[in-house]
Every structure is written in C-alpha cells, then in structure tokens.
Amino acid sequence: MKSLISLDFSANELSGMIPQGVAALNFLSYLNLSHNNLSGQIPTGNQLQTLTDPSMYADNTYLCGALVHKKCYPHEKPPPTTSKNKHQNTEPKKVWFYFDIMSGFAIGFWGIVGVLMLKKQWRYKLFMLGEETIDKIHVAVMITIMKMKRGREVA
C-alpha cells in the first residue's frame, strides 16, 4: 500500500479524522477527500506536502490546516462522530419492511388458497365464474370479427 499512486474517497460520507498513515504514502500523486464529513487537522508529511490543491479537501466543514485556510486550535474538539449517514439506521427498517411484505403475501395467498382448498362449493363457483367470463370474452371477440368481415364485404 505504500506504493499507492492515486487515492479518491470523495463523496463517500466519511467522518472522523484523516489518518496520519496517509502522510506515509511516499508515491501518492493524487488525493481527493472532498465532499465528506472529515474533521481535525490535515496531516502533513513527505508526499502530502507536494499535493497543494485545496479542492481535494473541499466540503469538509470541520477540517483545519493551511490548505483549507482554517486555523487549528489545540483546545478545539472535533465535532461529535454522529454521522449524517442516511443509511445508518435503515438496516432494521429494511428487515421489518421485507418481513411485512412476506407476511402479507403469505396471509393473502393462504387466505384465498386455503379457503378454496377447504370449501368445495366456493371452489366450484370460482371456476364456473372463470369459465363464464372466458365464454363471454370469446363471444364478444367473435361478434366483433364477424362485424368486421361484413363491413369489408359491403365495401
């Protein structure tokens, strides 16, 4: 990892301080940590001194150092690490969401299929309704076809 040339963690909703180990990356020629929630002082070190583009730290409100034109104070505490992560508490919600869907499907499916399996009269009426509906559709289609044939013969 020490021979890493490029590192781009932009727009990943990262929070906390930038690790000092980044300064030990001797071959690093590109770094982008913009659009995160990073805090604390920007590390200084060998290769990091050559990376002077301030846009690589853009939109990190709590970062301080020369490149972001904000002084670091020793008594200043970094902001609380409560992340603004949108996906932080969604895992339990997802589980309950899928559980609700599956239980609704099971209850609905077995509520109908179970009743049809147990009640012969209802099953018979359901299939008769289906047969009658198919017959009505067939008759309506055939009448329409016959009218179209007659219309063509007259013209």
Image: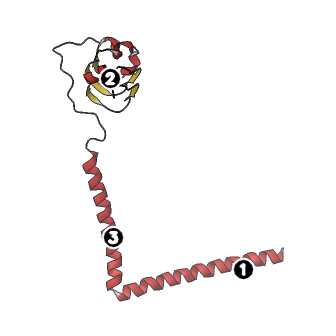
Q: Residue at x 35, y 33 (%)?
A: 12
Q: Is residue 85 left or right of residue 125?
A: left
- Residue 142 horizontal/vertical position (percent): 66, 80
The residue at which mark 3 appears reads as 108
SS class, disc 2: loop
* Three-letter code, disc 1: Met
The residue at which mark 1 appears reads as 146
Front label number (3 vs 1)? 3
Front label number (2 vs 1)? 2
Q: Residue at x 31, y 63 (%)?
A: 102
Mark 2 or mark 3, earlier in chain: 2
Q: Is residue 15 left or right of residue 58?
A: left
The residue at which mark 2 appears reads as 60
Image quadrant for the C terminus? bottom right
SS class, disc 3: helix
Q: Is residue 146 left or right of residue 129?
A: right
* Three-letter code, disc 2: Asn
Work out how far the residue at label 2 is from the one at label 1, CA to CA, in angstroms: 74 Å
Q: Residue at x 31, y 11 (%)?
A: 66
Mark 3 or mark 1, earlier in chain: 3
Depth check: give the residue in front, 81 or 104.
Answer: 81
